[in-house]
Amino acid sequence: MKAVVFHKPSDVRVENVPDPSIEEPTDAIVRVTATAICGSDLHIYNGFFPQPKPMVLGHEFMGIVEEVGSGVTKLRKGDRVVVPFPIACGSCFFCHHALPGHCERSNPKHYGPEGGVVESKGGALFGYTDLYGGYNGGQAELVRVPYADVGPRKVPDGLTDEQVLFTTDILPTGWTAIEWAELKGGETVAVLGCGPVGLMAMKCAWLRGAGRVIGVDREEYRLQKAREIAKAETINVEKTDAVEAIRSMTNGRGADVCVDAVGMEAHRTLLDKASNVVHGQVGSISALKLAFSAVRRGGVVTVVGVYGVPYDNFPFGQFFDKGLKLVAGQAPAHNFVDQLLQLIQEGKLRADDVITHRLPLSRAPHGYEVFNKKLEDCVKVVLQP
Ligand code: NAD
Ligand code: ZN
Ligand code: ZN
């Protein structure tokens, strides 16, 4: 079959690889009908998360069940499914605690309680490096889906691939960013990053009762997207002091909720890059620092942007003095897929309006390039195998 194979940073190729097969009775094989490139794929593409040997990428995908193992009871050949990006067994301690991203079984080689270091990662993710389980991903014609009774959800009739594809990742991630903030209604929510995840968070903030939604980015075309599809007020960090702007919009206090949908690949100055080398750090916590300053005292910061390593100069004194609440991590996508599919079906939520590029799988390298470099006003790339 054809698949998008990561070789080394900036080098992904569409190649012929062996078809996947059923390895465990609980596996299914899915024929992929649509898949997307995620901001998290860029961390591998840009070398922030190492992957020493070739691997099929992709953790946002959907398709038709081609084959099921003897232990699969909920799916059969021909079912049309979306597949959430974490691989979770459904029966371990963390799966029972609705924390699928922390599944104790799916990543036996590199799982550990410490976290954040090479030998201690969380549960597995599709197509997301050996450290996250070493499973091939869904930017391919076929994909092996472990624990097929746990992740995949059947797609309600009448919905197109594009309408539901993002229930696998960016939509539940945006939802999670708002869920964690426990809105009561009327809050001002500032979302840092108007990429696909930030845009989803803005849409979800409105649905959950926000009174005001502010999008922050450095790319004018993405701010325009935030105004158009997420009805956000916007701030360009390159042109305006975002902290001052948010304070002046909120009686000098700051936003009730700040979402970090940027992560460690925030834009870095030359000085930041030099400091990375000196401190042996990867990426930057500048977006998190912006969130701490832009949120009001007693407010909530939720972090869905990905961070990889320890960081010095973490502003703990500010965090303490302001009495902030901070929640971060992988989105527990499994918990929200059903609800999100229903909201889409009822016409209360749409996610497909982030798509700017529809490409055949064979053009994936171009898709990676334009998404990474923000060329051609790219916001979201969907690939069709
Ligand atoms: P993206 O890279 O397209 O979006 C990031 C946006 O941040 C870009 O628009 C960029 O211009 C903007 N940005 C960069 N520096 C900034 C700054 N200093 N201030 C404000 N904006 C800045 O990616 P995405 O797909 O939207 O993903 C965003 C983050 O969410 C990534 O880190 C990704 O890995 C992560 N993610 C996490 C989960 C999860 O489960 N927690 C799931 C999906 C994606
Ligand atoms: Zn993702
Ligand atoms: Zn589990």
Image (spheres, rainbow, N blue to C red):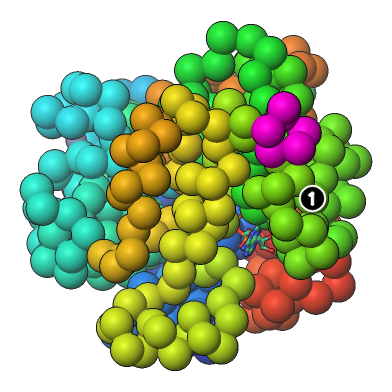
Q: Residue furthest top?
A: 184
Quarter of image, ligand 3? top left
Indicate whether residue 251 is drawn in magenta. Answer: yes
Residue 288 shows in this picture: yes
Quarter-of-image position of residue 359: bottom right
Between 357 and 143, the one lying in front of the other is 357
Going 52% across and 86% down the picture, which residue do you hit? 271
Q: Position of residue 180 (x, y in %)?
A: 44, 26
Q: Position of residue 297 (x, y in %)?
A: 49, 29
- Residue 362 visible from this viewpoint: no
| The stretch drawn in magenta includes residue 44 | no
Where residue 302 appears, as percent x and y from the top left, is 46, 37
Q: Residues within 10 Å of mark 1 (few under 14, many from 20)?
A: many
Q: Is residue 244 above or below residue 54?
A: above
Using the image as rendered, state which of residue 350 and residue 150 is in the foreground: 350
For the record, the magenta segment spans 247-252
Location of the C terminus by quadrant is: bottom right
The residue that appears at 29% across and 67% down in the rendered structure is: 312
The type of residue carrying mark 1 is Ile
Residue 10 location (% of width, % of height): 55, 87
Q: Tell me the residue that label 1 is attached to.
A: 235
Does residue 375 sit above or below 200 in this rendering?
Answer: below
Left or right position of 193 against 334: right
Task: Compare residues 315 and 363 and report the one nearer the observer.
Answer: 315
Query: Residue placed at 44% from the left, 73% from the top?
Result: 283
Mark 1 beta carbon near ligand 1 (under 8 Å):
no
Question: Is residue 102 placed above or below 342 in the rendered structure?
Answer: below
Specify the quadrant of the image occupied by residue 252: top right
Front residue (pair 127, 152) = 127
Which residue shows up at 36% across the image and 37% down it? 321
Q: Secondary structure at mark 1?
A: strand
Q: Quadrant of residue 206?
A: top right
